[in-house]
Amino acid sequence: MLLCVCCVGLTACSQPDPVWRLEGMQGTALWHVTVNRPPATLSEAQLQAGLNNAFAETNQLIGSWEPTSTISQFNRYSGMDWFSVSPKLAKLVELTLHISQQSAGSYDVTLAPLLQLWGFGSHDSAKERIPTQAEIALTRAKVGYQKLQVRLDPPALRKSQPDLHLELASVADGFAADQAGLYLESLGIHDYMVEIAGEVRTRGISPRGDAWRIAIEKPQEEAGRMVQQGVSLRKAGLATSGDYRNFFVKGGQRYSHTFDPTTGSPVTHNLASASVLAEETTVADAYATLFMVLGEEKAKAFAETHGIHAYFIWRTDDGFKTFATTGFSEAFINN
């Protein structure tokens, strides 16, 4: 959802320090890492291998597409006693439940059965369907963040319903970016940018010698990718959620992959894109998802009330309109 504009524009005489650009796959998403001034004791090949391993560890923790991952094992587990997990996963689930409670359930990481009912998550367009209200009601009975508990010490999860399904896709890319960033910092790397599926984590300075320049994409479905707004980041995570990449149209009606837990159906408001800035990309990722559920008016009010730095783009009859919270405008917009 974000265009990473990391234009270097440097010549050999003005760039004495090396810049490494690495990439790979995290599940089905492509990741990019740019490192400015890497340590002399580390080789680029060593860093590539280390990052591959860091992303693989994240997959094994929260990748619902990985049958052996911790989250997949928890989803298959039919018991209702405590299920041991790593401290990282327990803290991540604690964050998601906090936002669920904070938003009165508008954000919910147990929605997977509803997504599957509507055919989202499948590459087969024939599975995209409009279920009956009876089917939605039956499926909603399998959903609810209140049926999930987390314990930090010792770290564990517990479900109050055997078929409860935990899906952390709404924070997976942000979490992966943060974990990769922490790995880089453990190696003594302080100037870097990590990007995965549009979610970004930055620290330090860019190869230009100033802040990392990132662009928020215009939420258009056709005519290529265009920049809507630029931001400059030094120590922040930026995440964007939108409705213009994953949707289907049937009977002239557009159905987004963003669901309202209170109805069990895709949202119907005009918000096309929500971008959030936070120190940790995981947090930004979760709130961006929440705002796409709430819609432009409720999201603006929520962001202002809770001091969340956010930027919204919504559709009108005359084109797109935008709104940036006070904190977003003052701290991050690159004019």
Image: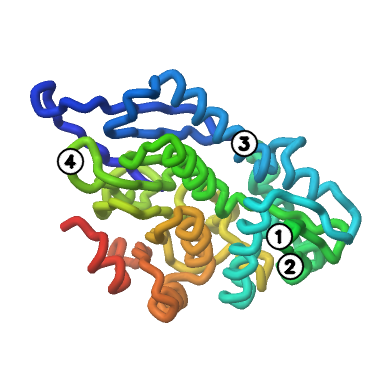
User: Label 1: which residue?
Assistant: 110
Contact, mark 4 vs mark 2 (Cβ under 8 Å): no
Question: As shown in the figure, which amino acid type bears the numbered disc 3?
Answer: Glu
Above or below, comparing residue 328 to residue 49 in the picture: below
Cα distance between the residues tagged 4 and 3: 32 Å
User: Label 2: which residue?
Assistant: 144
Task: Nearest to the eye among marks 4 and 2: give it.
Answer: 4
Question: As shown in the figure, which amino acid type bears the numbered disc 1?
Answer: Thr
Q: Residues within 10 Å of mark 1 (few under 14, many from 20)?
A: many
Compare residues 228 and 27 and report the one nearer the observer: 27
Contact, mark 4 vs mark 1 (Cβ under 8 Å): no
Cα distance between the residues tagged 2 and 1: 6 Å
Task: Nearest to the eye among marks 2 and 3: give it.
Answer: 3
Residue at (18% x, 45% y) in the render: 210
Pick whichever of labels 4 and 3 is earlier in the sequence: 3
Q: Is residue 8 left or right of residue 284?
A: left
Answer whether residue 323 is visible to the viewer in this image.
no
Percent coordinates x, y for residue 325 in the rendering? 32, 72
| Residue positioned most to the left | 13
